[in-house]
Image (tube, helix red, strand yellow):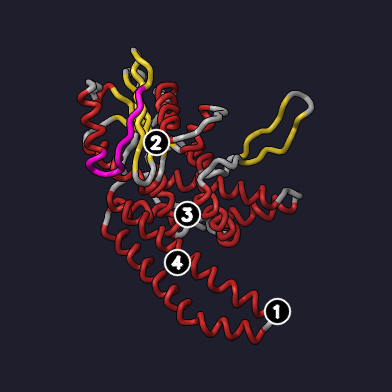
Amino acid sequence: MAHSNFIYFVGIDISKSTFDVAIIDQHQSPTSFKFQNTGKGVNAFLRLLKNKKYPLQDTLICMEHTGVYGRIIIAKLAEKQANFCVEMSLRIAKSIGIQRAKNDKVDAIRIAKYAEKNSNELELYTPIPLVLEKVKLLIKIREKLVQFKADLQKHPNEMKAFDPELGKLAEKNIKKTIKCFTNEIKRIEEELKELILSDNQLNSTIGLVTSVTGIGTITALYFTIFTNFFTRYTNPKQLACYCGVVPFEHTSGSSVHKQSKTHPIANQTLKKQLHMCALAAVRHDPDLKVYYHRKAEEGKNKMLVLNNVRNKLVLRICAVVKRQKPYKKQVA
């Protein structure tokens, strides 16, 4: 967590070619600058801070998560051991409230004000290990290939329903491409296995997480990446909330009593993965299978019961990682 002793607050709005900087000094109005999103541009930004006598130890720098666009500046700030945080854009927008005008300069000022307002609560950036960066890249490529393959298969399948002859023609002409996609997906999965085996911590973590019935290797890798080896969340409930599987109460006074439901602001990738894991778990885990069918027979909504199973899976994952012991499956 960041602390409250910062004197200067810097907001950075990053785009593909440039980044806008806003600096809040307690003794003057916010000042704005623009730099090229290159190594030279980042060095110019750091020289500006030095020339204006804004020591890095007294400065909190905040930026939105922009994926690859922020990699140059993040790497340089980490190298300089600067105090900085990378926040979700939605979290910043919600904190600021309704705004009318929007441009890069204004956005940088708003990010700086957000940093000043929330300095006690912000979590300073912690870089993930190189092995996880490699895993993250390979999983992203695998995602794209799986999606391309599904999209390519979709058209012939639809055609068969209305015109079998044209459907067969389409299927024939994409057969080699589908095989190529399948082979590439398998190749990447093999490369992922090699990466896992090459790192003791990663191999141990994936082994623990996949010991939970229903959790596969890809889901375990997603959890490890998003939590940075399960260091970003201090308790299972926080992680379950991040995954979007915790239902929240929705009541007001005596007239509004809606059913509790999960919040849409969540890691949708983990939520989707957990849904597939829950479907597998209620088929292969004796305890969860009994639980699911018992609740269904009681008349409970099946999606609600599945969400409870997703929640239980998160708790089990956290338990095995904390204890550093594999999950022991109950014998039916």
In whole angstroms, how far apart are the C-alphas of marks 1 and 4? 27 Å
Q: Give the label on residue 13, or none.
A: 2
Q: Secondary structure at mark 1?
A: helix
Point 26% across, 39% down: residue:
41
The reply, left or right, for residue 188 in relation to residue 57 is: right
Front tag of 1 and 3: 1
Front tag of 3 and 2: 2
In the figure, residue 15 lies in which quadrant?
top left
Residue 152, placed above or below residue 193: below
Circle 1/circle 2 CB separation < 8 Å: no
In x, y percent, where is residue 185?
A: 41, 69
Looking at marks 1 and 3 on the same chain, the residue that comes earlier in the sequence is marked by 1
Front tag of 1 and 4: 1
Q: Which residues are magenta?
A: 31-41
In whole angstroms, how far apart are the C-alphas of marks 1 and 2? 50 Å
Does 133 lie within the magenta span?
no
In whole angstroms, how far apart are the C-alphas of marks 4 and 2? 31 Å
Q: Residue furthest right?
A: 255
Identify the amino acid type marked 3: Val
Of 289 and 156, nearer the camera is 156
In whole angstroms, how far apart are the C-alphas of marks 1 and 3? 44 Å
Residue 157, placed above or below residue 103: below
Of 263 and 48, nearer the camera is 48
Residue 120, placed above or below residue 289: above
Front tag of 4 and 2: 2
Q: Give the label on residue 212, or none.
A: 3
Q: Give the label on residue 162, or none.
A: 1
Does 36 lie within the magenta span?
yes
Looking at marks 4 and 3 on the same chain, the residue that comes earlier in the sequence is marked by 4
Circle 4/circle 3 CB separation < 8 Å: no
Front tag of 4 and 3: 4
